[in-house]
Amino acid sequence: MLDAVVVGAGPNGLTAAVELARRGFSVAVFEAKGTVGGGARTEELTLPGFRHDPCSAAHPLGINSPAFRAMPLDRYGLEWLQPQLPMAHPFPDGGAAVLARSVAETAASFGPRDAGTYRRLVAPFTARWDALVRDFMALPLTALPRDPLLLARFGLVGLPPSTWLTRRFRDERARTLFAGLVAHVMAPLGGFATGAVGLVFALAAHARGWPVARGGSQSISDALTGYLTDLGGIVHTDYEVKRLDDLPPARAYVFDTSPTALARIAGLGHSYDGFRYGPGVFKIDYALDGPMPWTAPQARVAGTVQIGADSAEIGTALRAASRQGVAPEKPFLITVQPSVVDPSRAPAGKQVFWAYGHVPHGWDGDLTDAVERQLERFAPGFRDRVLARATAGPPQLATRNANYVGGDIACGAASGLQLLLRPRLTAFPYRTRHPAVFLCSSATPPGPGVHGMSGHNAAKAVWKHLRGTT
């Protein structure tokens, strides 16, 4: 009998498996798709030689993850590549605000009236980032805080809505960039704890940047798999699990799935009926005949580029995506251009580029024209460089990855109390009412992102269970 079976070979499932295998437990992973990866895959979606990331491409939380940093993933091929700028936010006038590794450079891009405000905002946390991120990403009760006073200070700043925090800024450049940071979790700007979301992304950039993985996000998943295999773990692909009886006998079952899929497979009935799924995304992967022709020079050297004319436009787009029915006319876009730092992703002289906009949950329309109108506002002539595109709305994303219910790539709405207390109100979010069944996906704290910390935290609950049943 195995000690643990993990269902789903995304970053969280693989991390949970590694953590258990490192402690001497026998582990097997079962993945429905033909390759490991979940939200961290790389595929030729458009033309031969163009290697695209179907979901995550830039990894500020990955390089800062306490779980990943404790593993020798570089020995298994993972190499982080840092663009000249982690992120840029261009404006219609041709200028841009930037999120740089340097706090001073970032502050200067906001203009003289807000530079000092930004420096004072981040100063208490930059020097103690490692303690803060470990405490923040280990919540809830998986470990005692290493620095409870620092965590409390962060909470005072971050728990109110981001709109309260951005009132400190006098000009639109800083407000717009910060609104874009918050929008990465697809939550309305006025929601609970959205200030913390923006701060975490900013502090992550100052600490270790927003890198891409050489060769694509698949290399993260492949590195985790290689390490797991060397530890004695086994990975099975092309193995769809529909019920617990499909799996071999084990002392614990760990699910890197949506809560509703877990309930269906494990026979947990209505355990997660109150769990909310959030807005979906409409994503386009492009093969380009050269670099993006951004008007703002800062955007040409940034790995990630946010697209939204101002904070009001971003807020309107997020509110529209949070309602059912009609997609935003001017969607807020998150774009990543890995080729600015990784030429291996496309043939010589060509580039890969992706963009996604937020749309209502389960929306089945075509956002291509609206996305490309937005891109043309900030990169005139962009369409002339498109060699091929691959589009995916909520239905297609849900088909590619069963965790993306209704196109929700966060595996659950990251808004309201569910931003922090997911998948339900409990001090033990990784446990279920079945004593041997656990949940480790992004539906559990600390939530969405390629960082493995949900798997790391869940593994603690699993090995406590395993020790107690020996």
Image: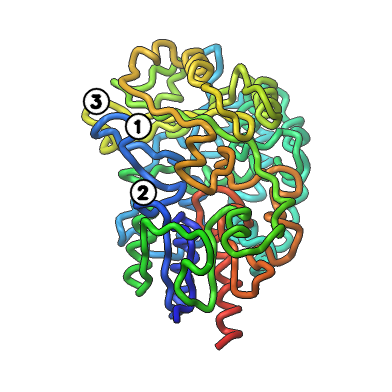
Q: Tag 2: residue type?
A: Gln
Give the label, 3 or 2, closer to the camera.
2
Judge from the rendering whether residue 469 lies leftward or rightward of residue 385; answer left or right. Answer: right
Residue 95 in view in this figure: no
Judge from the rendering whether residue 256 lies leftward or rightward of residue 34; answer left or right. Answer: right
Q: Of the residues under marks 3 and 2, which one precedes in the sequence?
A: 2
Residue 376 position in % (x across, y down): 47, 13
* Up-down relation of residue 284 to residue 242 (above or below): above
Q: Tag 1: residue type?
A: Val
Residue indicated by mark 1: 340
Which quadrant is home to the N terminus?
A: bottom left
Spatial separation of the CA atoms under disc 1 and disc 2: 18 Å
Neighbourhood count class around disc 3 (C-alpha, 10 Å): few under 14, some 14–19, many 20 upward:
few
Judge from the rendering whether residue 296 lies leftward or rightward of residue 310; answer left or right. Answer: left
User: Quarter-wise, where is residue 268 in the image?
Assistant: bottom right
Give the label, 1 or 2, closer to the camera.
2
| SS of the residue under disc 2 | helix
| SS of the residue under disc 3 | loop
User: Quarter-wise, where is residue 139 in the image?
Assistant: bottom right
Residue 66 position in % (x across, y down): 52, 60
Name which residue lies at 75% across and 33% down: 163
Residue indicated by mark 2: 218
Q: Tag 3: residue type?
A: Gly
Spatial separation of the CA atoms under disc 3 and disc 2: 23 Å
* Up-down relation of residue 145 to residue 125 (above or below): below
Q: Of the residues under marks 1 and 3, which one precedes in the sequence?
A: 1
Residue 349 is tagged as 3
Picture mark count: 3
Q: Of the residues under marks 1 and 2, which one precedes in the sequence?
A: 2
- In-front residue for pair 465/149: 465
Spatial separation of the CA atoms under disc 1 and disc 3: 11 Å
